[in-house]
Image (cartoon, rainbow, N blue to C red):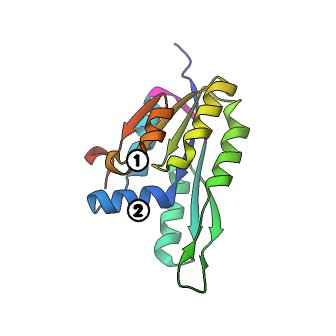
Amino acid sequence: MTNKPTVAVFADVQNIYYTTRHAYGRQFNYRRCWQQISQDGEIVSALAYAIHKGDDGQLKFQNALKQIGFTVKLKPYIQRNDGSAKGDWDVGIAIDMMDIATTVDKVVLLSGDGDFDLLLDRVSQNCSVETEVYGVPTLTANSLINSTGCFKPITEDLLL
């Protein structure tokens, strides 16, 4: 029996929610994605970064993520005076990935946000870790696709 590589998963919940909704009008299937990632490695850390509004639907979703195996990290939803909203986990994801990358064989990012391209380049080079990105093909930054060792397109098979 061969040991599976260890994997850390980082889910940019807001990005995945909005890109799958925009591209497909459907929701992402986190359970199926977990199963897919588990086929190639042992998930030893899984963090889901979300915004906390406190409504029932969100609480159910967060509990579902916990049931799958994710640790859910929450930031408060901030409504600005001009009506816009803020809820950005980019720096938190980057810090956590830098901390964890040296302890695993592979990091998997669920996001299409091009801001993460430098992060994936850095952990790949400095931590000698494989990188993998799951994103909606039409809404994932080319720079992010180019910076990862493996791009996994979110298509029908990963939707509810």
Q: Nearer the viewer, residue 80 or 65?
A: 80
- Where is 9 relative to 76, above or below? above
Dot 2 and dot 1 residues touching (CB under 8 Å): no
The picture places residue 102, in percent across and down from the top left corner, at: 71, 29
The residue under the point 43% across, 50% down is 30
The residue under the point 29% across, 57% down is 23
Q: Mark 1 sits on what residue?
A: 140
Image-quadrant location for residue 22: bottom left
The amino acid type, in three-letter code, at marker 2 is: Tyr
The picture places residue 143, in percent across and down from the top left corner, at: 47, 40
> Magenta region's main secondary structure?
strand
Whichever of labels 2 and 1 marks the residue nearer the N terminus, that label is 2
Magenta region, residue range:
40-45
Q: Secondary structure at mark 1?
A: loop
Task: Give the side of residue 65 with respect to residue 45, left or right.
Answer: left
Q: Nearer the viewer, residue 117 or 124?
A: 117
Task: State the separation of the CA atoms marked 2 and 1.
Answer: 12 Å
Res 18 label: 2
Mark 2 residue crowding within 10 angstroms, few (<14) / some (14–19) / many (20+):
some
